[in-house]
């Protein structure tokens, strides 16, 4: 049924050389994706509008899987919370906006379990995402919840489609 789904897709995987991203790129290729672009930070600074615009101009994608992030575990997050928040926000929000402006068909942003509500029902379902306030400590990391809300807005119905996905 879906065996040819990936064949004609032009996919950007931000963070595609990282821990999760390299696995995602490998799986996309195994499933038939022939046109996968992994932008490198040395070529495209995704924290800048120009870097994002250049990447989207150089590779006319119809799908973006956004995995790029400044990350480093709990200790690094505690030691440098403002730096992590700022850099990840400046990669994610402008990328989402420019993807919408360029009418990219699908934008997938991946978050961690840290962004889900404090009292999460199990099993967790996508429709439960964004229905409650997350743990207070996790509020700064929740820009991706806006992707879900954006997807439900009338503006999104004729343009880019966004979803968040769960990684287990």
Image: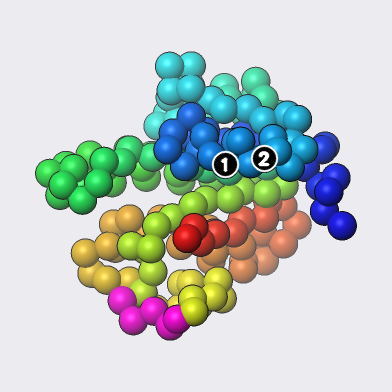
Q: Residue at x 82, y 53 (%)?
A: 2
Q: Position of residue 119 (x, y in %)?
A: 34, 81
Q: Is residue 44 above or below residue 30?
A: above
Circle 1/circle 2 CB separation < 8 Å: yes
The mark found on residue 116 in the picture is: none
Q: Is residue 47 left or right of residue 77?
A: right
Q: Is residue 85 left or right of residue 1?
A: left
Q: Position of residue 164 (x, y in %)?
A: 54, 59
Instruction: Quickly name the residue at label 1.
Output: 24
Say how the picture is coloured.
rainbow
Q: Determine which quarter of the picture holds residue 165.
A: bottom right
The count of marks equals 2
The answer to whether residue 47 is seen in the rendering is yes
| Secondary element type, mark 2 | helix
Q: Residue at x 39, y 57 (%)?
A: 112
Q: Is residue 163 above or below residue 7?
A: below
Circle 1: is it few (<14), some (14-19), or many (20+) Cα within 10 Å?
some
Q: Nearer the viewer, residue 57 or 68?
A: 68
Q: Position of residue 44 (x, y in %)?
A: 48, 22
Q: Residue at x 43, y 83 (%)?
A: 121
Q: Is residue 24 left or right of residue 138?
A: right
The answer to whether residue 61 is seen in the rendering is no
> Is 4 a magenta residue?
no
Circle 2: is it few (<14), some (14-19), or many (20+) Cα within 10 Å?
some
Instruction: Quickly name the residue at label 2.
Output: 28
Q: Position of residue 20 (x, y in %)?
A: 47, 42
| Secondary element type, mark 1 | helix
Magenta segment's dominant SS is: loop
Q: Is residue 59 above or below residue 134?
A: above
Report the span colored magenta. 118-122
């Amino acid at each position: 049924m879906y065996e040819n789904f990936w064949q004609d897709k032009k996919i950007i995987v931000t963070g595609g050389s990282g821990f999760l991203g390299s696995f995602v790129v490998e799986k996309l290729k195994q499933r038939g994706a022939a046109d996968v672009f992994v932008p490198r930070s040395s070529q495209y600074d995704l924290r800048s509008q120009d870097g994002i615009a250049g990447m989207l101009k150089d590779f006319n994608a119809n799908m973006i899987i956004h995995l790029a992030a400044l990350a480093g575990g709990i200790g690094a997050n505690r030691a440098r919370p403002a730096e992590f928040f700022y850099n990840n926000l400046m990669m994610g929000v402008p990328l989402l906006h420019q993807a919408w402006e360029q009418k990219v068909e699908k934008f997938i942003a991946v978050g961690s379990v840290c962004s889900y509500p404090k009292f999460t029902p199990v099993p967790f379902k996508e429709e439960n995402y964004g229905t409650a306030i997350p743990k207070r400590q996790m509020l700064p990391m929740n820009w991706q919840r806006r992707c879900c809300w954006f997807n439900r807005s009338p503006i999104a119905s004729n343009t880019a489609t966004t979803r968040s996905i769960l990684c287990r």
